[in-house]
Amino acid sequence: MKDTKVANLLKKEAKRQKSVVNLIASENYVSKDVLDALGTETTNKYAEGYSGARYYGGNEVIDQIEDLAIERALKLFGLSPKTWSVNVQPLSGSPANLAVYQALVPKGGKIMGMVLSHGGHLTHGHAVSFSGTFWKQVPYTLDPKTEAIDYEALKKIAKKEKPHLVIAGYSAYPRVINFKKMREVADAAGAYLMVDMAHIAGLVAGGEHPSPFRYADVVTTTTHKTLRGPRGGMIFARRDAGHGNKLKDGEATLFDKIQKSVFPGMQGGPHMNQIAALAVALKEASAASFKKYAKQVVKNSKALAQELKNLGWRITSGGTDNHVFLVDVWNGGKGITGKEASNRLEKAGIIVNMNTIPFDKRSPFNPSGIRIGAAAETTRGKKEKDMITLARRIDKILRK
């Protein structure tokens, strides 16, 4: 690279990544093949529109790349193209969610989502997000005793508030989501059920978390995190009017509505290098080795959480069923804020993020907890014994 300043910065970042223990639940390490695809000539091509219906010429090969990504995405999650399809053009998870709301929820309509401080996401209706600016959030929280979802409580909220769309899927929820019960919540309101599986997509693909597709109307996801692909987004949608509903004469399918919402409703030309890299990652995720990886992610997460618990740290909800968990470093008797804990660990070469915990009384800018994820270090080959050693190291650093 001729630009030595950028080249040196890139070298520094590569060195940093190799030198730390990465416990950020939203991050992972892609393969060399994915990186190679990101840096190809597909970056040069403008491909506004969809395969077979572009607004620019010269997209014959580009169409094949996008078609391949779509085919592999449907196959990975066991979906029939007769009943489901997928849009692979969203630039990330937030635009994917926005496209769904724009397509299915009227302006000023209600979106039922978990509050941010309990494990939800900014784009699930939070006031500072577009989702809370253009639509009204119907918030729900966790049970104060179990720190888990109370599905009957959610059903009561849905019956009363009648949201247009119910969201399942979270950024900091360590338990298995019961999608059947979430379907019942949506049905109680006559609402669409959208599952945001950004964090658990790789676990779903690997068979380590129940699939949402039997019950959901729409499923959004990022393509990094546990799926271990490039940064991007996907929207899966049914080719009907919604779960259990037949199309009326002339009515567009959910997928058709979302297609129009992504383009021309929101985005212009897609990032084709990103889609090419996604096609590579989807093939990798279909391999038997990926299923072993997903299984090891959950084993590692449980081992790390359990050892920290054994050492006296409070783990919210008592543990984890997936790749992520929250450690209450403030109320667990240690008197350390999440920010301080994160800073201490980073100085020691362990990267986590400060995070609110359910019913947190502290500020999100200096909360009571930290969020820990096992996906990235599992990619690096870590096993349960390594996680136990790591837990003891974390304990030692935080008790100084």
Image (tube, rainbow, N blue to C red):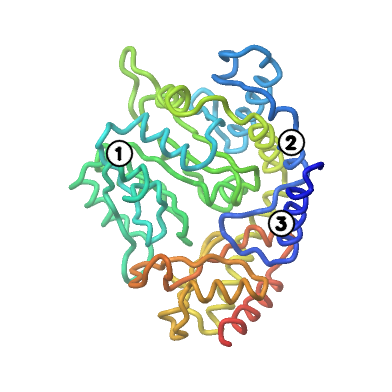
Name the spot of residue 341 as percent of width and height, x first: 53, 76
Query: What's under tag 2, amino acid-wise?
Result: Ala
Front-most of 297 and 57? 57
Name the spot of residue 333 as percent of width and height, x first: 44, 86
Query: What's under tag 1, amino acid-wise?
Result: Phe
Q: Quadrant of residue 32?
A: top right
The circle on residue 116 is: none
Query: What's under tag 3, amino acid-wise?
Result: Glu
* SS state under label 2: helix
Q: Local crowd at mark 3 within 10 Å, few (<14), some, or many (≥20)?
A: few
Name the spot of residue 307 as percent of width and height, x first: 59, 78
- Determine which residue is flagged by label 3: 13
The circle on residue 134 is: 1
Count the marks: how many? 3
* SS state under label 1: loop
- Quarter of the image with the N terminus is top right
Q: Is residue 181 above or below residue 363?
A: above
Q: Are marks 1 and 3 in contact (CB under 8 Å)?
A: no
Q: Local crowd at mark 2 within 10 Å, few (<14), some, or many (≥20)?
A: many
Q: Is residue 372 above or below residue 151?
A: below
- Horizontally, is 273 left or right of 87 in the view? right
Q: Local crowd at mark 1 within 10 Å, few (<14), some, or many (≥20)?
A: some
Please report whichever mark, 3 or 2, sits nearer to the chain's N-terminal start: 3
Residue under the point 57% across and 38% down:
77
- Determine which residue is flagged by label 2: 37
Q: Quadrant of residue 44?
A: top right
Q: Is residue 115 above or below residue 96?
A: below
* SS state under label 3: helix
